[in-house]
Amino acid sequence: MNMPITPQKPAKKLSLKDNYNLLTRGLGWETSYQDMDKVFAQDKFEGIKIHDWDKWEDPFRLTMDAYWKYQGEKEKKLYAIVDAFQQNNGQFNVTDARYINTLKLFLTGVSPLEYQAHRGFAMVGRNFRGTSARIAAQMQAIDELRHAQTQAHTISHYNKFFSGLHDPTHMFDRVWYLSVPKSYFEDAMSAGPFEFITAISFSFEYVLTNLLFMPFMSGAAYNGDMATVTFGFSAQSDESRHMTLGLEVVKFILEQDPDNVPIVQKWLDKWFWRGYRLLTLVSMMMDYMLPKKVMSWAEAWEMYFEQNGGALFNDLARYGIRMPKYHEVASKEKHRLSHEAWATFYNFSHAAAFHTWVPEESEMKWLAEKYPTTFDSLYRPRFEHWREQQQKGERFSNGTLPMLCQVCQVPMFFTEPDDPTKICFRETTYRDEKFHFCSDGCKDIFGNEPEKYVQAWLPVHQIYQGNCFRPGTDPTAPGFEPLAEVLQYYGFHVGEDGGEYLGSLDARNWTQWTGKPAVAE
Amino acid sequence: MQVDIKTTTVTQLRQTFSHTARAIGGDKPASRYQEATYGMQPLVNFHYRPLWQPEMELYDVRRTAVVMRDWYALKDPRQYYYGSYTITRSRQQEAMEKNLEFVEKRGLLRDLPEPLRAKLIHTLVPLRHLEWGANTNNCYITAYGFGVAITQATMFHAMDRLGLAQYLSRIGLSLDGNSGEALAEGKQLWMHDDTWQGLRRLVENLMVCEDWFELHVAQNLVLDGLLQPLVFQQFERRFSSQHGPALSLVTEFMNNWFEETSRWVDATIKTATAESAANSALIHGWVSHWREAVRVAIAPYADAVFIEDAADALAAVDAQFDSRIAKLGLKAAVDTGIAA
C-alpha cells in the first residue's frame, strides 16, 4: 500500500440501545420520487393520527444477528426434544386419549390463527411508516410463522396415531365451529393496520393470551404431553415479546393524539367482546376436555381478566380509556360459559372433528366444587340424563343445525346475563333483512359496521344454501343425505374424527396400545 | 452376545397430514419442509372483504398477473422452514460476528488511509437504505403473495435484508469508530448525492409496484442480480486485491447469502416461466423493463465507484446476469431499452 495507515481513536463502546438505534432507526427515509402517502397508502384511512413515529420506543431492540442467534438456539433445542418424543412414543404418556381432543381443537382452531397472524403482521410490517414499528411487526410476523410450523411439527406425531388431526387447515376453512376463530382473525386482517395491531397485539396477545394460548400449554404440562409443553416453553419468550409490543402499540397510539382515544376505545370494546366469545371454546377445553384439570374457567377469568385486566385498564385510565364494554356480562357468564358450550358440542358431536363425552362422576364433583352456584342445580341433571340415555344405548345427538350469531358465529346457546335459564336472543334489521345475535356485545359490533358483518360466511346458512358439498355432488340424487355430504366436504373421516368418545377408534386404540383404560382412573 | 431392547410396536394410522398427502401424491412420510409448507394458508370461504382493497379477497390469486395452476409449485430448493432457516443463519452470523470482531479489534477499516475510508463509506454505507427498501418489498410480497411456498421464503428474505442493512451499518460503524458519523454521511448521500439518486428513485418506484410477482422479479432477480455482484464481487475484488482482505472479511456473509438466495430466486422464476407462454411473456417483459430501469439507475453509481473501470465492471455483471437468466428459460435481454 502506498498510502499511510491513519490510526484513529479506538472504537467507542456502544450500549445495547445506542447500537440498536444506530443499526435501525435511520434506515427508513422520507421518499421524494414517490409520494410518502402512496408508499404507505394504508396508515391514514382509519383516522389514527401519528405525528412522530420516532416516539416509538422499541421494547426489545433486537437486531437480526441476535434474533437469528437466539431463535436458532431455541429451534435446535425444540426439535431435539420433538425428535426424542417421537422416538420414545411419547404420545402414549398422556393421561388418556380424551386429552388428544384438546390438541384437535388447538391444531384446527388455534394453529391456523398463528398463520393468519404471520400474514397480518407482515401487512403491518409493510404498511406502517415508522421504521422501528415496522421492524417490531416483522419480527412478530416471522415468529408467528414459527408458531404455526412448530405446532404442525409437534402435533404431526399425534396425527399418526389419533383421529381428527389429519386435515387442520382444510377444516379451518370449512367447519362450522372453526368459523369462530377464522372470522375473528379475518375481521382483524380485513381492517386497517392500526385496528389489526390493536386487536391482535393488545386485545388478543396482551389481554387474553393467558386465557388462550397458555391454558393449552398448561393443560399439556398437566396431562403429560411433553411435546406440546416443550413447544409452549419455547414460544413463551416470543409471546412475552408480543405482549410487550401490544402494550407499547396502544400507549404509542394514545399518546400521539387525543383524537385517537375514542377510536381506540371503540376497538377495545369490539375486540374485547370478539376475543371473549372466541374463548368460549377454551372455557370448555379447560373445564371438560382436560382429563387432569389445571384450573377452572371461572378461576382463570377472575385471575387473568378481572384482576390483571382490571389493573391494566386502571393504568390506561390516564389516557381516557375505560374498561371494555360488557366486561361485566363476561363476569356474569363465567359460572356457566363452559357448561353451556360443552353441552352444545355434546349435541353436535357427530358434526365435529373431536370427541365429546359425559364427565365422570369425579369430574362432576370437581365441577360442583368449582361452580357451587350453578353446576349441581343447572347442569348436572342434564349430564346425568344423557348418561342414562347413553347407558341405554341411546346416546343423544341433535340432528338439526344450530342458529349462529351473525358476528361471533358461535351457536346461539348463551343465556341472558341475568337469567341462566333463558337463551339470549338479539336481532336487528338492516336493509330489510333480519340478523341475529347472541348478545348485546355482538349486536353492537354489528351496528357499528353492518356492511362488514352482513358479508359473514355463516356455516349453517351456507349449508342450507347448498354451498357445503363437494364439487359434483347432486343434492337431487335419490337417497341424498345432506349432513353426510357436508361432513365429506369438511374432510372428516366420518365415524372416526367426531362423535362420542367412549367406544371410539381413539378410545379402542388407546386401550389396545397402552393397556390402559380409555378413561384414566 | 446380542442385546435386545424390548419395544412395543404400534401400527401408525397414517404417515402425514391429509393436506400434505394431497400435495405430495399420497400418504407417505413427509419432510418437515413439506409439513410446514403445504396447506398452511387459508384458501376459501373468506368472511369479509378487506377495507383496504374491497375488490379482492383477503388471500387472492389476482394480486399478480402471473397465473399458476398450483402456487405450491414455487418450492424453495433450500427447503427452508422457520427452524432450518434460523439454524442456518445463526451459524452464519456466528462466522460473520467473528470476522467483524477481528476487523474491529485491529482497526482494519477504521485505520485505513482517509481516502480509502471515504471510498468505502461512499460505496457501501448508503446501501443500507437500499437493503431496507428490499426488506419493504419482500415484506409486501409476504403480506399479499399467494401460497406459503413463496411467501415464507420472502418472509425469510425480508428478514435477511434487514440483516444485510444492519451488517452494512456495522461496516459503517467499523469505519467511524462507532460514532455514527459514517451512517449520517451515508444517509446524506442516499438522500441527496447524485451518485445515489438513480438507485433511490428505482427503489421508491419498486415500493409502489402493486403486482407482487413483478416486484419479486424486479427486486430479487433483476436489481439484486445486477447490483449485488457489482458491489460484493466486482468492487470487493478490486478493493481487496489492492488493500488487503479486511473488506472481504466483512462482506463474506453478503457473498454467501447472494449465492444461496439466488438458487431460490432462480427456482421460483424458472418454474413460473415454464408454467405457461403467458407467464413467460409477462416475466420477459418485466425482466427487460426493470433491467433497463436498473441500467439507468446504476450507471452514475458505477461511474463513481469504478471510475474508468466502470464499463468493464458493468459488462462483467451484465454477462453474468445474461447467463443466469438464460438458464431460467429467459432470453438474454438483447433489446435492453425496450420497456414492457
Image: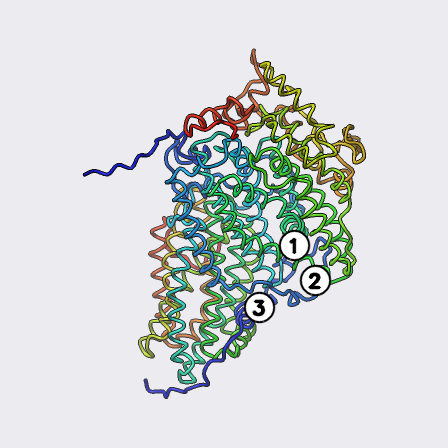
Reading the chain from its start, which is encountered first: label 2 or label 3? 3
How many angstroms separate mark 1 from mark 2 (CA)?
Answer: 13 Å
Horizontally, is A447 left or right of A68 in the view?
right
Same-chain status of marks 3 and 1: yes
Please determine whether, in this image, residue A106 is positioned above or below residue A520. Answer: below
Q: Pinpoint the chain carrying mark 1.
A: A
- Locate residue B158 relative to residue B315 in the image: left or right: right
Residue B247 percent coordinates (x, y): 37, 73
Q: Left or right? Give the position of B53 relative to B131.
A: right
The scheme the figure's colours follow is rainbow
Helix, strand or loop under label 2? loop
- Residue B250: give x, y in percent of width and height: 39, 70
Callout 3 secondary element: helix
Please give the residue where the numbered disc 1 appears in the rendered image.
A42
Q: Residues within 10 Å of mark 2 (few under 14, many from 20)?
A: some
When asked about the image quadrant of residue A415, the answer is top right
- Chain letter for mark 2: A
- The picture quadrant where one finds residue A291 is top right
Q: Are marks 1 and 2 on the same chain?
A: yes
User: What's the residue at 48%, 71% (across, down)?
Assistant: B169
State the residue at coordinates (61%, 44%): A212
Mark 2: amino acid: Ile
Residue type pointed to by label 1? Gln
Marks 2/3 same chain:
yes
Q: Which mark is residue A50?
A: 2
Does residue A119 appear anywhere in the picture? Answer: yes
Mark found first going from the N terminus, 3 or 1: 3
> How far apart are labels 2 and 3 at the CA level?
17 Å
Q: Which residue is mark 3?
A: A25
Q: Secondary structure at mark 1?
A: loop
